[in-house]
Amino acid sequence: MGFEKFGQVSFTSQTRAAEFVDYLEKGEVRATKCNECGRVFFPPRADCSWCMSSNVEWLEIKGQGKIDSFTKVNYAPTGFEKDVPYILTLADFDGIKVFGRMNKEISEDNVKVGMAVKVAPLTLSEGKITYEFLPA
Amino acid sequence: MPKDVAIIGVGQSHFVRGYPGSIRELAFDAYSEAMKDAGLGPDDVNASIICTAPEYDKQRSPSGLIAEYLGLNPQPTFAIETVCSASSTGLKVAYSMIKSGLHDIVVVLGFQKMSEITSADSQERMGRGADIMWESPFGTMMPAYYAMHARAHFNKYGSTPEDLALIRVKAAKYGTLNERAVYRKGVEFDQVMSSDIIASPLKMFDCCANADGSSCMVLASADKAKEISKKPVWVLGVGAASAAMTMTGRDALSGLSAAREAAKAAYEMAGVTPQDIDVAEVHDCFTIAELMAYENLGFAEPGKGNELIRNGETYIGGKIPVNVDGGLLSKGHPIGATGGSQIRTIVLQLRDEAGDIQVPGAEIGLVHNIGGVGIYGNVTILGR
Ligand SMILES: [Zn+2]
């Protein structure tokens, strides 16, 4: 349990990677790293299918990423009506790719491919939590 | 070129908004046409494959229901799902069943009744056709994902919203000629450019229409095909591949790797090259998807796809006519039925029965059918 707290609308309650939410609550966005081969996973995985191993550790995503692509969504799917518009963004942190939303205050005109961003936890209503991108 | 398995019958319902019947009746529309086309009855069929995506209607295990209604008991039946490419996957499985010698005649039936739920609910289901743990909680939907591919393509290659609008204008031109298309009006360039932005940079006219519809293909072994059919269309190549479901797991957004891999496999199997293709159906769920398809299928170099549409090369009379039935953009996109409808269009082309949209002398055709946002790539090459 615990993972149902992740995101505005959650579709999964149980995962062996639920510690991700605990780290968000502590103010950190973390990936996992396989202790056998050293591969880093985001979204975090509880298992490494290259090593057939579940020996992973948590690793904070720090510093600046670069925007790969983004889109401003004007029409929401069911459950997200109150959120629109929002900007979905894919960013690359030295080879670790992170998908999420841009901070609500940032207008689309100020978002560019290649732009530097950082990622930080964001507390939502009703005990929910997620993360978002901010200009770096 | 392998000539081991043929398509000997094709059928398709009208693609409509709000089909006034149940899924079994919708399935019957395509099935009855395909079986009459093949000149067969239910007892001639050895197995059926039902292709559909879940959660649009309430029926669980639809293959049982559909097989019963179509008179296909006691033959084996089962369902296949690769979302939007389910019926191309169905064709590949039917091919394998026949090529192995297990069966002689297999029916592949695709259907979707999308109008049972609202458009927002349908986007929610499609959004859950992505990683529900890590992406759907952000409010993802198909237009947003393809929009991110579009932005990346624009940024890397200098393609533009105008290029995408040209693709929509082409689709609409041929949609007016297809009496089974859901959207039959012409669309002007300015209309596309001034339409509402759904997920930037994609506008309303960059997106295909939801529709209710069904499609059906009857496949046969070489011996049976030669015995039964005057105009068998041969399955020369079947290529399929997969790619990461997550955006984070993709190598680059400027193309679809599953489409490239599937195309490579299909060309190799058929022993042909992109230059040999006379007519193609590509998965234009969004205009950007057609542009990427030009490049992923090798009709253009990466980044040069826009030259094909700017020069009109994908119209009838051009170098490689693409989606001359209106494509998903105008014909409509009833998920499980789409691949079978694309294949039907190419079969009619190769039989010289395509009427107003006939590409003169077409001998080899290609179908590119993608499931989800580039998750499942399917390329099928057909010849006469
Ligand atoms: Zn490992």
Image: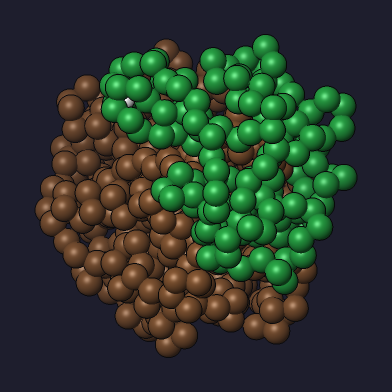
Q: Which image quadrant: the C terminus of chain B?
A: bottom left
In the image, B258: left or right of A124?
A: left
Task: Examine the rendered structure and indicate whether residue B54 appears above or below residue B89.
Answer: above
Splitting the image into 4 quarters, where does residue B76 fall?
Answer: top left
Q: What is the number of callouts on the image?
A: 0
Q: Position of residue A57 (x, y in %)?
A: 45, 22
- State the image quarter where residue B186 is shown: bottom right
Q: Nearer the viewer, residue A15 or B368?
A: A15
Q: Nearer the viewer, residue B147 or A25?
A: A25
Residue B20 visible in the current orientation: no
Q: Is residue B263 visible?
A: yes
Q: Quadrant of residue B48?
A: top left
Farthest residue to the bottom: give it: B311
Instruction: Indicate the position of residue B236 as horizontal and vertical percent values.
Output: 21, 50
Say which of A135 and B73 sits in front. Answer: A135
The structure residue drawn at horizontal position 53% and vertical position 65%, both measured from the top left corner, is A114
Instruction: Ligand 1: give its quadrant.
Output: top left
Give how far across and how far down residue B238 sits, in percent: 26, 45
Give chain A's shade. Answer: green
At horizontal 37% and vertical 25% (from top left) the residue drawn is A34
Image side of residue B166 versus residue B76, left or right: right
Question: Would you say A133 lies left or right of B305 here?
Answer: right
**Colour in which chain B is shown?**
brown
